[in-house]
Image (cartoon, rainbow, N blue to C red):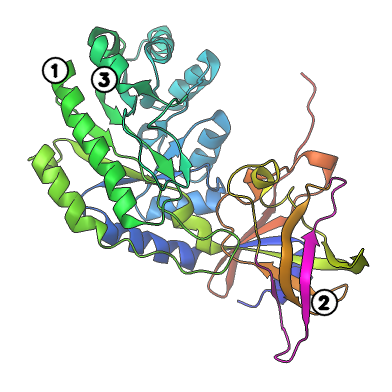
């Protein structure tokens, strides 16, 4: 679909999400994973209900870590009993809310976390199932962002579980049904992913024997990488499947029959390619020899975590719509947004075509960690309209609003 008519209709800046790209990414990832495994969609990548609904129709379950994500999962037609509620600091109030909404599976990070879930379950008189989140004692180099394998707020150190297994045996109101091990994110190398899965598979077998349980579910994590805010194709991870199946055969001979059920998680891989942010050049000026391209969009709409020194920093690749073939280059440009902070920048030293106010620029591969991964409340600026398309058809358009309510 042409993006210019959407800007004319809904304004600038605008996020556009293409459901066809989500289906293609899902099909590619399913080819890379064991055929009878579960796949959770991590809503932190993009909680838009229309995207959640599309992935739900494709068979994905929802991995959530807040009441807001639960609300978006339910708005996207996810079944509460199929959601996995995770996070290292679940409060009693949000656990109670999740239970009353019908959530039945929680990932717990410590005995205290498990006890808090148990107290909420006892209060409503319904036992719940929990996965023990485990922090491995082995690090894997090459992770985009390390979650476990060193000191971490996520999960219980495996040595802690080995020393005091009784503390992790569950309670009368929480039944330990498996394990959750997620080592890192944004991993582009299949061999690195396989190393994380190998560690997870080995530890689930060891800890199952230690706790004397036959797990029903083992969540081996994910971390499937994808280009962010630059051009690039969805990665091919198809070589994972045979190696993964061999690892599972060795540790869990009956896994193909669902003993245990094997699960993976994915967020950015499923939705990144679906998203494009279109914005408008407001000014082009020079300061001390450097050209500055000033846009109507910035880190409040994209890359806010990068602007706050989240690694990696954003280095957005902007593509001019309807760029003439012979357009002159605007070299060494600094691409900045409208916010009153010098942190509001997307690129330094960018090689852009010659630009003038009113030109439209598109940033690809921003369906993940885009709008809701940014500083949307900073300076109180309007959020972009989010338009969901399927090929050449507009399915819906909406705008995320922030309001202050009396309490």
Mark 1 Cα shell of 10 Å, populated few (<14), some (14-19), many (≥20): few
Percent position of residue 77, x then y: 46, 44
Eyeballing the image, is 163 above or below 64?
A: above
The N terminus: image quadrant:
bottom right
Residue 216's quadrant in the figure? top left
Percent position of residue 85, x then y: 43, 29
- Res 355 label: 2
The C terminus: image quadrant:
top right
332 is within the stretch colored magenta: yes
| Residue 18 appears in view | no
Extreme bottom residue here? 326
Eyeballing the image, is 351 above or below 145?
A: below
208 is within the stretch colored magenta: no
Residue 111's quadrant in the figure? top left
- Res 212 label: 1
> Which residues lie in the magenta part?
317-341
Residue drawn where x is 80% and y is 67% of the image: 280
Mark 3 Cα shell of 10 Å, populated few (<14), some (14-19), many (≥20): many
Eyeballing the image, is 267 above or below 378?
A: below
Percent position of residue 175, x then y: 26, 17
Q: Nearer the viewer, mark 1 or mark 3?
A: 1
- Label 3 with label 2: CB-CB less than 8 Å: no
Q: Earlier in the sequence, mark 1 or mark 3?
A: 3
Residue drawn where x is 49% and y is 40% of the image: 73
Q: Secondary structure at mark 2?
A: loop
Residue 197's quadrant in the figure? top left
Q: Secondary structure at mark 3?
A: strand
Q: Which residue is mark 3?
A: 176
- In three-dimensional space, the C-alpha distance between marks 1 and 2, rounded to whole angstroms, equals 66 Å
Count of picture labels: 3
């Amino acid at each position: 679909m042409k993006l210019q008519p959407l800007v004319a209709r809904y304004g600038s800046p605008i996020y556009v999400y293409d459901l066809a790209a989500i289906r293609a990414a899902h099909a590619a990832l399913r080819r890379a994973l064991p055929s009878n495994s579960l796949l959770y969609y991590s809503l932190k990548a993009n909680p838009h209900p229309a995207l959640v609904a599309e992935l739900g129709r494709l068979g994905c379950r929802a991995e959530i870590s807040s009441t807001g994500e639960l609300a978006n999962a339910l708005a996207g037609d996810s079944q509460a009993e199929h959601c996995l509620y995770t996070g290292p600091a679940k409060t009693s109030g949000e656990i109670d809310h999740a239970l009353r909404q019908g959530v039945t599976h929680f990932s717990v990070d410590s005995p205290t976390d498990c006890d808090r879930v148990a107290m909420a379950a006892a209060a409503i008189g319904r036992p719940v199932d929990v996965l023990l989140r485990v922090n491995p004692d082995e690090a894997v180099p090459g992770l985009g962002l390390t979650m476990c394998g060193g000191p971490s707020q996520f999960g219980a150190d495996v040595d802690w579980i080995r020393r005091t297994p009784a503390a992790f045996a569950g309670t009368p109101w929480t039944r330990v049904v498996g394990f959750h091990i997620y080592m890192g994110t944004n991993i582009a190398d299949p061999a690195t992913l396989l190393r994380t899965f190998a560690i997870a598979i080995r530890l689930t077998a060891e800890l199952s024997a230690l706790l004397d349980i036959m797990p029903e579910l083992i969540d081996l994590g994910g971390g499937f990488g994808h280009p962010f805010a630059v051009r690039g194709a969805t990665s091919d991870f198809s070589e994972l499947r045979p190696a993964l199946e061999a690892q599972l055969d060795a540790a869990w001979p009956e896994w193909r029959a669902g003993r245990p059920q094997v699960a993976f998680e994915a967020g950015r891989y499923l939705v990144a390619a679906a998203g494009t942010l279109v914005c408008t050049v407001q000014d082009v000026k020079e300061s001390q020899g450097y050209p500055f391209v000033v846009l109507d969009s910035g880190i409040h709409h994209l890359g806010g975590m990068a602007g706050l020194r989240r690694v990696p920093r954003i280095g957005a690749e902007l593509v001019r719509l309807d760029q003439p073939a012979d357009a002159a280059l605007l070299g060494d440009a600094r691409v900045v947004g409208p916010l009153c902070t010098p942190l509001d920048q997307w690129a330094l030293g960018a090689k852009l075509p010659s630009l003038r106010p009113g030109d439209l620029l598109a940033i690809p591969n921003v369906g993940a960690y885009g709008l809701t991964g940014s500083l949307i409340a900073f300076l109180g600026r309007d959020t972009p309209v989010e338009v969901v398309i399927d090929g050449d058809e507009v399915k819906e358009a909406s705008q995320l609003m922030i309001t202050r309510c009396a309490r």
